[in-house]
Amino acid sequence: VTSAAEVPTEPASEASVPPVAARFDQPQWVWPFEQVEAGAAWKSSTGSNVRVGIIDMGLVMKEHEDLNVVQYLPPPAIYFPAEHATHVAGLACAKGVVGTVGMAWACPIVSTEVAEVMGYNSKNEPIVEWTPQSVIAGMHRMLDEGHVKVINLSLGIGDGCTSAAQNAKTATYDAGLKRTFRAVMDSEAGKKVVWTIAAGNRCAPLVASPFGLNSDLPNVITVAARNSDEELASCSDYGPGVSLAAPGGASVPPLELTEGIMSTLPASCPAGYCSTYGVMEGTSMAAPIVGGIAADV
């Protein structure tokens, strides 16, 4: 594992070249950097000293060789790294020392978990969801203790394409909670942070979260997902309330087909947890790419 102290704040090589491992230096994996013209930005800044907060359903993997996790809020009683949170964090902040790189190289990561146990299934496994109360608490933890400049929320309501009736129900629910989250984002402390938020993966003309509806605030960016050909990803929400689209979908022809974007992941090993890499797709991936770019700025 490479420590944060061993990672240079600026790369020794040309800043315009994504510093990924050789096995990931392929068009189907580096297209997100090219699509957002990251190379031009990296010549001025790689965002390496900007703290980025990840609010997610699980914790970012602290042992990952390409991540610089500096703080958990609060310190977990039981530590368990989550795939989604770790993948999201890598897109914003991966070091690029061993595998993939984020839009802000090796930026310090502050992680908080907002999952709540809502019951148990027939196998006695916990059913976990986020609630407005748990997300609000996570936002306050970040603002009060995290010293972060960017906070990413790759959270939504449901997943997968939905009907018009379901969309209407979601929109009504979110609209009722919009002001609750606005009060945090538009507070004195909240205004000092850039909030990047996943638009949702319901293939619908709506923003699938009450916090994402606040994209009219100057410090809130709600993000849709697009593919390597710059077309909207099939899963992505769109329409009013979406600020912009960023890489989050698949690599498509003329590039080799993939099922998403490559980033950091945890793996189970005999001695604990090991570092690995894999693909995920959705607006959850697009939002932290924008978060990393915000850290560069």
Image (spheres, grey):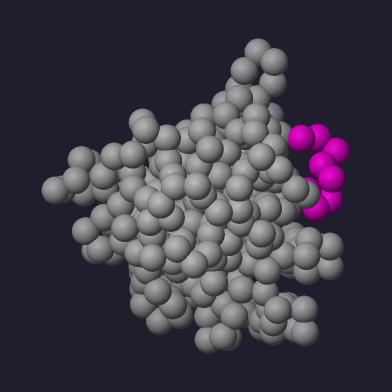
* Residue toward you, 144 or 46: 46
Q: Nearer the viewer, residue 102 or 236?
A: 102
Residue lying at the far top of the rendered structure: 270
Residue 153 seen in the current view: no
Residue 47: x %, y % from top left: 58, 61
- Measured along the vertical axis of the image, is residue 83 above or below residue 16? above
Figure quadrant of the C terminus: bottom right
Is residue 73 found inside the magenta-colored segment of the image?
A: yes
Q: Residue at x 26, y 55 (%)?
A: 228
Q: In which image quadrant can residue 121 be found? A: top right
> For the view shown, which residue lies furthest in the left direction?
254
Asked whether the viewer can see residue 99, the reply is yes
Main secondary structure type of the part rendered in magenta: loop
Residue 117 pos. (x, y %): 73, 45
At a point 30% along the width and 52% down the height, the residue shown is 31
Q: Quadrant of the N terminus?
A: top right
The residue under the point 80% across, 53% down is 73
Identify the residue at the far front of this view.
12
Q: Residue at x 55, y 54 (%)?
A: 10
Q: Position of residue 72 (x, y in %)?
A: 78, 48
Is residue 213 toward the left or the right of residue 192 in the image?
A: left
Task: Locate residue 262 relative to residue 108 in the image: left or right.
Answer: left
Does the magenta run of residues contain 116? no
Q: How far across and how far down the image is residue 145, in percent?
A: 84, 62
Residue 294 placement, left or right of 123 = left
Which region shows up in magenta? 72-79
